[in-house]
Image (cartoon, coloured by chain):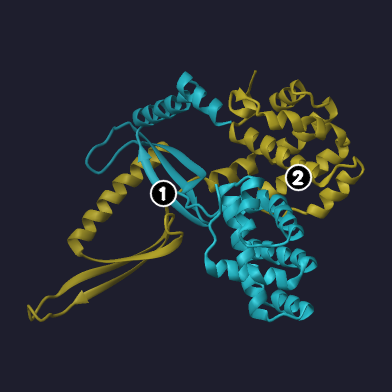
Chain colours: A cyan, B yellow
């Protein structure tokens, strides 16, 4: 699968030839930092001063490079495809090799950063419960009515919410049975086959 | 194999694994570390530097020190949760491979603090709401826009309730006529009589 680069991106990456092969390492590091922590304008300015190129050109170059790295890591393209994709930029062989090395070294880390960007549903944090027995109420004395009160703590993107639920023991037993059945599904042949094929 | 201090379930694998770490510390130092862990479980501040000093002889890594605190927290709180007496705890820990002096030192610390630990756990149990205080005032209505001579007493009640779901104190004010107030008082006295039969 080949990476398609727009004209603007090609122009941005064109500054890499201006910078020279040695500086490409520096720009590559800046691009990865951009992905890890977000914009670092001071670092770009320092690099621009050192290489004697305009700040804007450096900024565009770093952004173009980080786009190249994220798209390649996202699609997990092979070495050959990566080389073919950047071949269209018309860089020297040295530069192509440097870019390929940059891609392969940082691919795993970039993929782990990208995996955290997917939307998440609220996830389980903890559970508090209590078991009560209602013995009497205003309308009826001499009762025995057990009830389980549950406080479900959920996490969603660093937001903590809590949900309070109440159930009687037979519903709770049914709930447990359903959840155990769901867990049991993992052991069926169908699920085992899918899990084996995914590895 | 079922253990009482685990609630008649199997002992968790990680607890089993950390028993050997506990055996590396001398039994005297283990008893002192237990005292610190009990302070933390009872809601007082834990003195981590003291624990570091006590574990320095056994040359434990920082991960092992945290594991020691975690496994002691689990054993002590789980034993209190399931109301396990000190001798049973000692014999069960020895079955897991903890040397006799270590087990008896640990269980002596546990025995001293067992009831305070259980009181603390009871206080931490799930509560959805708690009555903080009640304020009241009795007024006498002389007259209103509807009727020139009203001449009736009126009770104002204010319940300050700590709401567990919202996590803050909420004020619930209400006004009652004399008759309504008498009914409320009679019903609450009946509920109180029922509660007294259970105490």
> Can the viewer see residue A115?
no
Pick whichever, B44 or B156, lies toward us: B44
Q: Which residue is mark 1?
A: A163
Using the image, determine if residue A160 lies above or below residue B155: above
Residue A66 is situated, as x and y percent measured from the top left of the image, at: 62, 62
Residue furthest right as drawn = B57
Q: Chain of mark 1?
A: A
Q: Position of residue B159 (x, y in %)?
A: 36, 63
Left or right of residue B164, residue B51 in this image: right
Dot 2: within a 10 Å radius of its alpha carbon, few (fewer than 14), some, or many (20 or more) residues?
Answer: some
Q: A16 or B189: nearer the eye?
A: A16
Give the quarter of the figure containing the C terminus of chain B: top left
On screen, residue A139 above or below B134: above
Quarter holding residue A177: top left
Q: Is label 1 in a helix, a strand or a loop?
A: strand
Residue identifier under label 2: B66
Q: Nearer the viewer, residue B118 or B66?
A: B66
What quarter of the picture does the N terminus of chain B occupy? Answer: top right
Name the residue rendered at 63%, 67% in the picture. A13
* SS at mark 2 in the image: helix
């Amino acid at each position: 699968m080949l990476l398609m680069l727009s004209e603007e991106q090609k122009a941005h990456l064109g500054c890499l030839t201006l910078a020279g092969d040695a500086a490409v390492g520096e720009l590559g590091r800046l691009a990865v930092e951009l992905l890890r922590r977000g914009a670092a304008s001071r670092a770009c300015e320092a690099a621009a001063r050192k290489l004697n190129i305009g700040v804007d050109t450096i900024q565009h170059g770093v952004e173009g490079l980080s786009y190249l790295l994220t798209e390649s890591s996202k699609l997990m393209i092979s070495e050959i495809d990566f080389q073919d994709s950047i071949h269209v930029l018309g860089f020297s062989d040295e530069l192509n090799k440097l870019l390929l090395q940059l891609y392969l070294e940082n691919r795993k880390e970039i993929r782990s950063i990208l995996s955290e960007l997917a939307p998440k549903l609220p996830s389980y944090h903890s559970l508090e419960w209590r078991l009560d027995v209602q013995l009497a109420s205003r309308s009826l004395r001499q009762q025995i009515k057990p009830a389980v009160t549950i406080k479900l703590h959920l996490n969603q993107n660093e937001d903590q919410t809590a949900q309070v639920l109440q159930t009687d023991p037979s519903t709770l037993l049914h709930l447990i049975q359903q959840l155990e059945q769901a867990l049991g599904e993992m052991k069926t042949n169908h699920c085992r086959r899918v899990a084996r094929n995914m590895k | 194999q079922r253990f009482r201090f685990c609630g008649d379930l199997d002992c968790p694998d990680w607890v089993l694994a950390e028993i050997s770490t506990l055996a590396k510390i001398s039994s005297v130092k283990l008893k002192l570390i237990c005292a610190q862990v009990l302070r933390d479980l009872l809601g007082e501040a834990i003195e981590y530097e003291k624990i570091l000093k006590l574990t320095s002889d056994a040359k434990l890594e920082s991960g092992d020190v945290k594991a020691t605190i975690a496994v002691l927290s689990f054993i002590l709180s789980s034993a209190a949760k399931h109301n396990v007496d000190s001798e049973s705890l000692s014999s069960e820990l020895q079955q897991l491979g903890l040397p006799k002096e270590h087990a008896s030192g640990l269980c002596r610390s546990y025995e001293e603090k067992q009831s305070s630990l259980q009181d603390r756990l009871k206080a931490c149990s799930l509560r959805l709401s708690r009555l903080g205080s009640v304020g009241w005032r009795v007024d006498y209505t002389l007259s209103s826009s509807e009727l020139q001579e009203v001449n009736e007493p009126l009770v104002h009640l204010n319940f300050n309730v700590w709401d567990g779901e919202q996590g803050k104190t909420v004020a619930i004010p209400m006004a009652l006529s004399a008759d309504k107030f008498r009914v409320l008082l009679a019903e609450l006295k009946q509920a109180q009589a029922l509660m007294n039969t259970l105490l």
